[in-house]
Image (cartoon, rainbow, N blue to C red):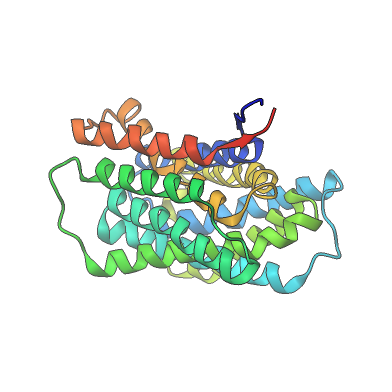
Amino acid sequence: MPGRRTTLDGGAVLVALSMVLIGSTGTAQALGPDGIDPLIVGVLRLGIGGPVLLGAAVALGQVSWSMPRGPLLVAAVAMAAYQPTFFGGVDRAGVAVGTIVALGSAPVFGGALGLLVRGERPGRRWGVATLLAIGGGGLLVGGDGGVGLDPGGVVLALGAGLSYAVFAVATRGVLEEHPPPGVMAVALTGGGVLLTPFLLVGQTAWVGTGCGLAVSLWLALVTTALAYGLYGFGAARLPVATTTTVTLTEPLTASMLGLVVLGERLAAVSVAGALLLAAGLVVAGTSRRSP
């Protein structure tokens, strides 16, 4: 009797590619001008990237005007909430800890919400992948010998993880019935509109510099418009729990870029964590099928 073979899931590959692009956010900010405001970065990502993706989706006929408003409103609110909670958590708890708490908690929230809202029961493969990925993420950021945690920063990062999971759940059902680029574009644009008031209180002078403009365009066009276009196509083919686990590609990418581009160093424990995290992503991104 022929055995079952392991195959790479195309949806997981697309989500992982989107997270590779999003994972360049921190490096882009580090290479940006002095005075760069992380909160304004989040506002510009949605405020520019969302409309650009929406324009492209409309031009390509990928927007369905019959999309349900309720789930998209929830998705827009969740994406808007993600920006200040994520960047606030990173600012208070540190880049490494804030990122891994936010994205490490997203699979847990995603699995729970996927079960409660959509009746998707996470399988054993998801459990193994999530444990490997979260454990690896913990080693990845803990390799410097330990850090002092800011409780407020951790709470904000957990809020970001919950926001991302809500976004994934809210858009999953819409993605089943409507073109992914249009779904992502409407949700991101809506989130950008909700964040517009922050432009009145944030530091925006850096945007007018040549370096600031280049960073803003990279973050809006590549890490938002292109990245979430890919994410939409991938997430439409995956359970919510798997999608949120594969998003852990982002902190892995951020760490590798920090090593290669910014000249940061990884301790042996961090290297082991990166390998463990990568193993979890491989488990999440493959499936067992009969030949």
Is any part of residue 73 visible from this angle? yes
Q: 103 or 135: nearer the eye? A: 135
The mark tally for this picture is 0
Image x and y of residue 235, in percent? 64, 49
Image x and y of residue 72, in percent? 69, 67
Residue at point 62% right, 71% down? 117
Q: 4 or 47: nearer the eye? A: 4
Image height check: is 256 above or below 229?
above
- On the image, which quarter does residue 267 sit in? top left
Image height check: is 262 above or below 61?
above
Residue at point 31% right, 50% down? 95
Image height check: is 29 above or below 189?
above
Which image quadrant: the C terminus? top right
Residue at point 63% right, 58% down? 188
Image x and y of residue 236, in percent? 70, 50
- Asked whether, in this view, residue 141 is left or right of residue 148, the answer is right
The residue sitting at the front extreme is: 1
- On the image, which quarter does residue 263 sit in? top left
